[in-house]
Amino acid sequence: MTQISEVSNLLPQYLGIFILMLSTFLIGYFSSLWIQKSKYQGIIKGQKKKIAALKEKHNAIIRNKNINDIDTIFTEIKPKIIKVVREVQEKLVIQSQNAIIEEESPILDEEIKVPKSVAEKTRTSYITYTKTKPKLNFENFGTADSNNKDNLTKIEGIGPYIEEKLNEIGIYNYDQISKFTFEDIRILTDLIDFFPGRIERDDWVGQANARKVH
């Protein structure tokens, strides 16, 4: 009986100790969970930012590449557009000249009335009326010919048509392009009817230097 009484007296103390230990365990457990969750949330948030930055960088590269591709395509077709426009203008000039001659000389015989000479003269005057193009100073970067020709289309921004234009004016290899000065680039841009600043933006000089190494 005495033992039962002693146990009954100690039970509240044991129960208090048990509750205290359980509380301590639960506090420690949930605190650890919260700390781990906060830690991993920070890591996940940081990784999400890195992924977002990489995506934006990738999209920017694609946008720039698309712009460069559009510029290259337009550069390739620009001379053809100019050629068609000139042909149309020539035809309009000739037709206009023919109409004036026929209107002013309705009773002329066939030999005098035929306006071929006038039309040809008009056409020749139109074609030869072009602005004076500047000339490249080949002493700056050297001369070359088809015997030491490189595949210039491997340089970004140079398509088959631009390569042909470069060859026509004496630019054949990477070594020449790698030695271009600012003045050379300015004159070349004018000679091949290229977009101003495009050669610098595509870094032809740097690309040519890299190609020389290979």
Image: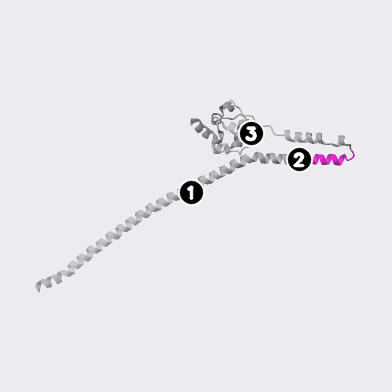
Mark 1 surroundings: few (<14), some (14-19) or many (≥20) residues within 10 A: few
Q: Are marks 1 and 3 in contact (CB under 8 Å)?
A: no
- Name which residue lies at 48% across and 46% down: 58
Q: Earlier in the sequence, mark 3 or mark 2?
A: 2
Residue 62, horizontal then vertical, whole percent: 52, 46
Q: Which residue is mark 3?
A: 191
Residue 212, horizontal then vertical, whole percent: 51, 30
Q: Earlier in the sequence, mark 1 or mark 3?
A: 1
Image: 69 above or below 205: below
Q: Which residue is mark 2?
A: 91
Q: Earlier in the sequence, mark 1 or mark 2?
A: 1
Mark 2 surroundings: few (<14), some (14-19) or many (≥20) residues within 10 A: some
Q: Which residues are magenta?
A: 90-107
Q: Which residue is mark 1?
A: 56
Q: Element at badge 3?
A: helix
Residue toward you, 66 or 26: 66
Direction from residue 118 to residue 198 in the image, left or right = left
Residue farthest to the bottom, as pictured: 1
Image: 60 above or below 164: below
The Cα atoms of the two marked residues, 1 and 3, are separated by: 37 Å
The Cα atoms of the two marked residues, 3 and 2, are separated by: 26 Å
Q: Quadrant of the N terminus?
A: bottom left
Q: Nearer the viewer, mark 1 or mark 2?
A: 2
Amino acid under disc 2: Lys
Q: Element at badge 2?
A: helix
Can you tell which quarter of the image residue 203 is in?
A: top right
Amino acid under disc 1: Glu
Q: Nearer the viewer, mark 3 or mark 2?
A: 2
Residue farthest to the right, as pictured: 107
Q: Element at badge 1?
A: helix
